[in-house]
Each structure stands twice: as C-alpha cells, then as structure tokens.
Image: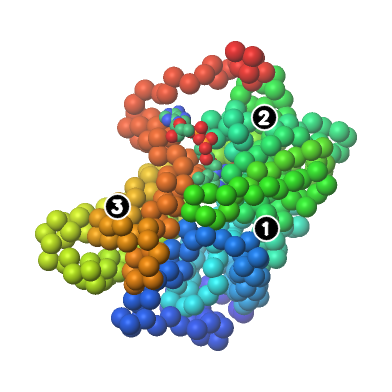
Amino acid sequence: MSDAVPTLEEFEQEILAFLDANAEKKELQRSEESKWGEGSDDVSLFEEVDRDKELEDLKAAQAWRAKRYDAGLGWISGPTEYGGRQLPPAYDRLYANLEGRYKIPNMGFFGIGLGMVAPTINAHATKEVKDLYLAKMYRGDLVGCQLFSEPGAGSDLAGLQTKAERDGDEWILNGQKVWTSGAHYSDIGEIICRTDPDQPKHKGLTGFVVDMRAPGVEVRPLRQMTGGANFNEVFFTDVRVHDSHRLGDVNEGWTVALTTLMNERASIGGGGGGGMGLASLTRLAQLVEHFGVNDDPLVRQKLMDVYIHFQVAKYNNQRAMDKIKAGQLPGPEMSMAKLSLTNNLWRTANFVTDVLGPRVIADTGEWGTFAWGQLLCGVPGMKVAGGTDEVMKNIVGERVLGLPKDPGIDAKAPFSQLLKN
Ligand SMILES: Cc1cc2nc3c(=O)[nH]c(=O)nc-3n(C[C@H](O)[C@H](O)[C@H](O)COP(=O)(O)OP(=O)(O)OC[C@H]3O[C@@H](n4cnc5c(N)ncnc54)[C@H](O)[C@@H]3O)c2cc1C
C-alpha cells in the first residue's frame, strides 16, 4: 500500500478488488429483490435474537472486520498509527456504498463500539488506552458497549448515580446501568460515573473504559416486545478500574458523554441517508404493486409522502455531514437527523400497515408481510434510544429555534442536595 492519497476513482478500484475477492455480490434482479419481503437483512435490526445464533453471527462479523482491517480498509478516515488510512470522510462513504452491494455478515454488533465508544476513546483517552483498544476495536477483535442509562437516569442522564471512588491508582465502581445494548457480547464498555456528589449535577461526573469481564461486573438480559433480548441490566459491585482507563479529566465526564451522544445521533440519524436501507421507493412500490393497490390514489399519495420525507431528511443530513467535513463539530443537526429518521421509519411502518392490514402481524408465510411486523414493533424503541423524540425536540427548539429553555433544575446546586429535595 502506498502512502500517496488515492483519488476516489483509484480508491473505488481498490475497494471493489477487495470486495470481489472476499464477498459475493448481491443480485439486484427483481426476482431476487422480492425475497426482501420475507425477512432479509434489511429488517434484521428488529429481528428476534437467539443468543446462541447471535454468537455465531458475531464470529462471522468479526472475521469480516478483520479481513477489512488487514486489507487497509478497517478505519478509512482514522489515524495511521491505529491502522487507519487518514482519508477524508467521503472515502468512508464510498466504502459503505460499495460494501452495500455485497453479501456480508451483519455488522450491527459494531454500531455502538465503533460509532460511539471508539470516537470517544480517540478524543478523550490516555495514549495507553488508545494503544490498547483502538486498533483491536476497528479490527473487530474487541466489541464495545455504552453504559450510560440507569433506572433513574435516561433522558436526564446527568442524574446518574453509579459511583466511582478513588483508591490510589484505581477507582472502585458500584451501581447499576440499564438498557445496555450488546453488553452480553461486549469486551469493554464506556461508563459514566458520579465521582463527586457535592459538585453540581453536570460537574461531578467522570468517564472510564471498563473491562466487561472484570470481577464484579454482572450482565443480565432484558427481553423486549419484538421477542429479542438485545438489552441488558449491568450491575457493578466493587469493580476496579485503573486510573489510566479514565476518559478525560476527573469530574469532566459530561463533556465525554456529550462526545458520545453527538456521535450516537450522527450514526443513528446519518445511517443510509436517514433511512437505514428501508427508504427504498422501489421496494415500497413493489409491495404496493404486489398487493394490487397501486391504482388507489390514497395509497399513492401516502407513498409519495413517505418518499418526500426521506428525501428531505437525506438533504438535511448531507448539510450536517458537509459541516463535519468542513471541520466543525456536529451539533443540533444531529438531533434533527435522529428525529427525522425515527419519524420516517414510523411513517414507513404506518404506510406498510395500511397496505397489509392484519397481515403485518400474522406469520402466514405470505410474501412481503410478516417481516414488516418487526419494523412496526422496533420503531418505538428507536424513538427512545439515543435521546427520545421529545428530548430531540427540546434541543432543536432551544438551540435552533431559540425558544426559551426547559425550566429544569438549579444547575449550580450540589447533586447531593438535589437528591434530598
Ligand atoms: C433500542 C434502545 C437501545 C438503547 N441502548 C442503550 C445503550 O446501549 N446504552 C445506554 O446507556 N442506554 C441505552 N438505551 C437507553 C436510552 O438511552 C434511554 O431509554 C433514553 O435515554 C430515555 O430514557 P428513559 O428510558 O429513562 O426514559 P425517560 O427519560 O424516563 O423518559 C420517559 C418519557 O418522558 C419524556 N421526557 C423526559 N424528559 C423530558 C423533557 N425534558 N421534556 C419532554 N419530555 C421528556 C421522554 O421523551 C419519554 O417519553 C437504549 C434504549 C433503547 C430504546
């Protein structure tokens, strides 16, 4: 591999050579495409998960990431010292577009680790921690999870109470996290803890990277209404973390959490131009045709409504991505992108439900029906994950429209005093 920056055309050839040598191309003929309605990977995000099968899928996903990384395509825009190519984000997008044409394992296992945890490690960790984890995460050898939410702290994340107390060169963690996606197969987690309850709510927090297999970490599954169990409760009892694994300064964990949250909103909202692969007009039109309602003017109108909203989200996302490309930090645009995505998926689920009626929840084996039930049951969770719709609207209202701030709490009062009130 030469150090010279390849042109996008040269890079495309490099990517295609890698993909052709290592993966099978998807058939895009109509007959093949129609299999999608029977539950292809497009709706796998919402599928019921059998944990044994999940581990097999994880191994396949790790093997694919290792191949990518070893071919110099594992962290295209990342620093060369961690196996990256230091190329502009457009090269990342090119890879994602081209890879989408091939049959590869489900890469959802890495969404949180690479979309949120790794960028936070890169921005806030010590060199020792970066050296230990970054390359391994991008190679797929290590999977990361996000340990933020607690039973009493979700939207109000800064109200979290998991404690970290200093003991020499180590910190001792005690408390409980909840809704931790993928904790059961993760190797490391990014955790935000309260390190000084006498500081104001947003000030006494500190971030750490924690070993998910350390003594005192207990992961318990939670089953959700889709039938899957992607979430967990995670209990910490006297878990020791070395100070070198601290993210950022002591009591500055809110800044660390914001880095992760902005990346989370960018990776959820930005995925597939705000559509996560479900925004295909062709596919929705196929469904409408198959069920013989393509001449119904109301169906046509609703279909166009779905399409137009996805297009608007796509252009809005492009604006946000261009801002990032110009070296600016992602801001409220990410909240808009996240809000548009979930609203558009909800619009899609409602449209499909209108077309299919009860067939959307009855597993009859009929083409183009039941798989959509997973979307219908999964979108409400997406409207909550990574900041709820209401919280996104607060951010857009305050930071974009300049509306008065949510009354909230006394931001200067010590957290310990707020707990007593
Ligand atoms: C699919 C999924 C994956 C997740 N993965 C993770 C993960 O990996 N790691 C992790 O740490 N967490 C994860 N979560 C948790 C997620 O971050 C929280 O569910 C979310 O922050 C909301 O918190 P909560 O559930 O405690 O709801 P609450 O914050 O209690 O909210 C309850 C309701 O009140 C509304 N509300 C709250 N505050 C306001 C306000 N100020 N103004 C208006 N309305 C308000 C909310 O919109 C919501 O409707 C995940 C959640 C989901 C659904």
**Which quadrant of the view contains residue 193?**
top right
Using the image as rendered, state which of residue 79 and residue 211 is in the foreground.
211
Q: Amino acid at mark 3?
A: Asn
Using the image as rendered, state which of residue 3 and residue 15 is in the foreground.
15
Crowd rating for badge 2 (residues with CA inside 10 Å; few <14, some 14–19, many 20+):
many
Q: Is residue 421 visible?
A: yes
Mark 1 — residue? 185
Disc 3 is placed on an element classified as helix
Labels 3, 1: front one: 3
Looking at the image, do the residues carrying marks 1 and 2 touch, with CB atoms under 8 Å apart? Answer: no
Alpha-carbon span between mark 3 and mark 2:
38 Å
Q: Amino acid at mark 1?
A: Tyr
Disc 2 is placed on an element classified as loop
Q: Which mark is residue 389?
A: none
**Could you tell me residue 309's position as x and y percent?**
27, 53
Crowd rating for badge 1 (residues with CA inside 10 Å; few <14, some 14–19, many 20+):
some
Mark 2 — residue? 161
Disc 1 is placed on an element classified as helix
Q: Locate residue 183 relative to residue 347 in the image: left or right.
A: right
Using the image as rendered, state which of residue 161 and residue 353 is in the foreground.
353
Where does the C terminus fall, quadrant-wise? top right
Q: Amino acid at mark 2?
A: Gln
Using the image as rendered, state which of residue 203 and residue 279 is in the foreground.
279
Question: Residue 380, relative to residue 89: is it above or below?
Answer: above
Q: Residue at x 74, y 51 (%)?
A: 212
Question: Residue 158, relative to residue 337: is it above or below?
Answer: above
Q: Residue at x 38, y 45 (%)?
A: 339
Q: Earlier in the sequence, mark 3 or mark 1?
A: 1
Q: Locate residue 218 relative to residue 58 in the image: left or right.
A: right
Mark 3 — residue? 350
